[in-house]
Amino acid sequence: MKKKWALLSIIFLIATFLTGCEPLTVLDPKGPQAETTRDVIMISIWTMLFIVVVVFALLIYVLIKYRASNQSEDYEPPHIHGSKLIEGICVGVPIIIVIFLSVITVKSTYEVESTPKGFEDEEPLIIYVSSSEWKWHFSYPEENIETVNYLYIPTNRPIEFKLFSHGSIASFWVPQLAGQKYAMANMINTLHVAATVPGDYVGRNANFNGEGFAHQTFNVTAMEEDEFQEWVEEVHATADPITIDRFEELLEPGHLGQLTFTGTHLDFLPPPSTHHGASHGEDSEEHNEDHSSHDSHDDSGH
Amino acid sequence: MEFFERFAVPNPTFTIYASMVAIALTMLAVVIGITYFRKWGYLWSEWLTTVDHKRIGIMYLISAILMLFRGGVDALMMRAQTAVPENTLLHAQEYNEVFTTHGVVMILFMAMAFIMALMNFVTPLQIGARDVAFPRLNALSFWLYFMGAMLFNISFVVGGSADAGWTSYFPLAGNEHSPHVGTNYYMLSIQIAGLGTLITGINFMVTILRMRAPGMTLMKMPMFTWTALITNMIIVFAFPVLTVALAMGTMDRLFGTHFFAINNGGMDMLWANFFWIWGHPEVYILVLPAFGIYSEIIPTFAGRNLYGYKSMVVSIVSISALSFVVWVHHFFTMGQGALVNSIFAISTMAIAIPTGVKIFNWLLTLWKGKIRFTTPMLYSIGFIPIFTIGGVTGVMLGMASADYQYHNTMFLVAHFHLVIIPGVVFALIAGMFYWWPKMFGFLLNERLGKASFWFIAIGVCVAFFPMFISGLDGQARRMYTYSEATGFGIWNMISFVGALMLAVGFVLIVYNIYYSTRYASRDISADPWDARSLEWATHSPVPEYNFAITPEVNSSEAFWDAKKKGHKLFKGEYKEIHMPSSSGVPFIMCCFFFLWGFALVFSMWITAIIATLGIFACMAHRSFEVDHGYHIPVDEIKRTEEKLGGAKK
């Protein structure tokens, strides 16, 4: 019996950690998308905790009450057929819980797949994110600049990440801003994000893609809009332009530090033309025209 | 020289060289040992050529335990590597190979084999049959599995192990990103073992549907047989997908096709879809028989009938149906949009309903019972709380929007280990302890058994609970290292301690087997647990023909009724028993399969053609063979029955 109590206390310990410990990255959101996922996670934890407590309580009760050493020698357990009422409860309660969670899931899934709440009317900043072995390339077509392994974004403005890959599948993840999404070679995935708090956030590839996987990280800095504009101007004043040769060098498998360029590689190496995962009406067709022609991506890494 | 260079391991380390020496020495010792004790003949005639389902079950059991330790050492290496930040015990490539082989070995070569072991041994006994429907095919299944497993394991010392994750997502698993032969091994060894599984699926489906004892209608089958039936149906539907996917993957790697490539019309998502259309039902292929085992053990040691037999049947059937419509939840983040994700999120969470019904039925089986805390029962009871935690976190993962945060993190790793270990491993150990007397005629030691339980149960919690936290803190799975600043260190260190406890628990089980084999009393009855189903109605160990007289059944607990209500199981006189004869062909054919796989891994075309011809020659041999089996005469049955402690009637 000791073990059951030990288990129970471990569960409570975990629950306390999950609720009391702000710094757990996923539960410390800095934007509306991550807030939505945090809320969903917390609701599900409490619901699940209820189920766990009920099961544990029932188990401990029957184990203590009906253990052989607690009963007389000649006790013969009865043959019991199912009871409609009890089985109804056993099926009914889980159904109600699953319906409850389904409603939350559907609602929140649509939420995280669309423009962040509160920013519906604003023009989103479009950033193309592409992964190569084992780096991240960020292209800002509007600002006409490109960075490697770091990302500057303005706060309080919706951002649309257009994700794709120059090789194997990677997963773009900045836990404090939004849940992850895959970057794949033959299509573009859209991830909607907004940061409401300025600061530095950790981003990484979450999908295993070979030897350099563990170190495929990047840094996201969220700053006020005017600071962001200053940075853009500074880049234009100081950074070198990106060229085909330079970019192909960058695609070689390996790790790099943070790099900054003017221009984007999208001009000479257009992203894939198919779009996925954009679940809202205003799918960015207007940003689409300059890369309608696209060859197969056999350029990956070599 | 070029020819031999291909067999070299791309990243040789001390461990690999040490393993080479260890493997060579072990094989030498085995060969010398068998020769010294003059056991070659015995080994050939009694084991390598056997078609007896009980012996095949025991061979599966031995292989599964070996693979458990192979996969377990991988697990320990992983946890040791990540126990502290910036550890240099393993480098990235080694770590990638270790977690890939850990996944493949544990799922396909350990858990599957362990399930096959119990299914082979128990199912024909539970339905009162003499053997499976196709005994020789059963031997073929085992040897296909065995050769597949061996082929996968030699990759460690010849040519290099697979390193693209057990899911082997393309394009990572393609030639460009995984140039050495590891992934060839993955494709071919799983293919060979998978063919064996598919054959088993057909074999057991036919066995259970056609060979039940008189009176055993479908709704009077014991619960383990029910789960075996449903499991084999899932196998028959799911494994062809794997066969096709692996064949396509092999062609991509060996013949330059582009099914899963990212250029020339290939689709990398296609692999993910194929893999999980097989892979998700595979989870239920593992867990349903485990549910069946618990449904045998809990009533036995609660001294009560299984509560809600009908709802148990309904729930396993609905779980099996749902298992085929949830595969997309493995890639919620692949960009299929909110609508598709919502549909698959709901179908995923729906699985919690029948699973919940089963949990409550087990709890209600304990209710008003007389609970004896034996080792198999401890594992079965320990399963309930730990599996519940694993299960509810599965529902959390099923919520698509939240999954965007859990996906590919340690949270997921914690979830599926807390489902698979109590859900499958506990059941297999419990089943092994439970049916051991039936297999070998003696009980495993209870003290050691209980000690192993506590180590394993507590070890699982210590090893995997911290991963929920590190996952929510942003630790992705499959990272071979992390920096100190991430703060993951403490959680990973706790996990490592848990892994060590698990290791102690598993070593105790093996020590228990050794200890009990030497010292346990052989003087036990055929029914040491006071059990309820038919397999306990025959002798321990079981004679080759299982039942001298075919039993007649009137409920799902026929043996219990025979004991308590005076129902007569065995009516009539002894008759001649027809048995299938042993055959070396399945073994030889699978040796050719091994050669075939090995040749293809290294693109040795001539050898591959010879091996293919060998395989077909074995099939041709069978088609021209006239073999009607043999009959055991009545006198011999009488003698055997008397020798085994009085004729059973």
Image (spheres, coloured by chain):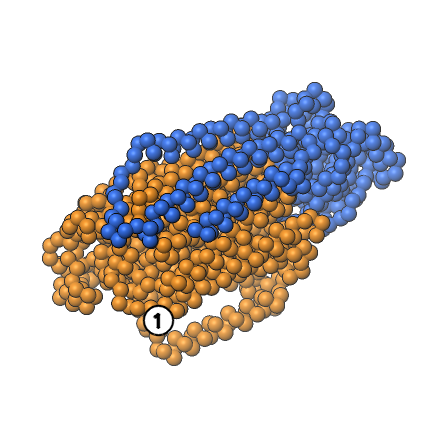
Label 1 crowd bin: few (<14), some (14–19), many (20+), radius 10 Å:
few
Q: Nearer the viewer, residue A214 or A76?
A: A76
- Rendering coords of residue B462 (x, y %): 54, 53
* Chain B painted colour: orange
Residue name at image x 40 percent, y 49 percent = B381
Which residue ends up furthest to the right in the rendered image? Answer: A237
Which residue ends up furthest to the bottom in the rendered image? Answer: B36
Observer able to see residue B261: no
Answer with left or right where residue B443 lies relative to residue B476: left
- Rendering coords of residue B337 (x, y %): 57, 30
Observer able to see residue A232: yes
The chain assigned the colour blue in the figure is A
Q: Chain of mark 1?
A: B
Answer with left or right where residue B171 lies relative to residue A72: right
Number of numbered tags placed on the structure image: 1
In the rendered view, tell whether residue B450 sits above or below residue A133: below
Q: Circle 1 sits on which residue?
A: B519
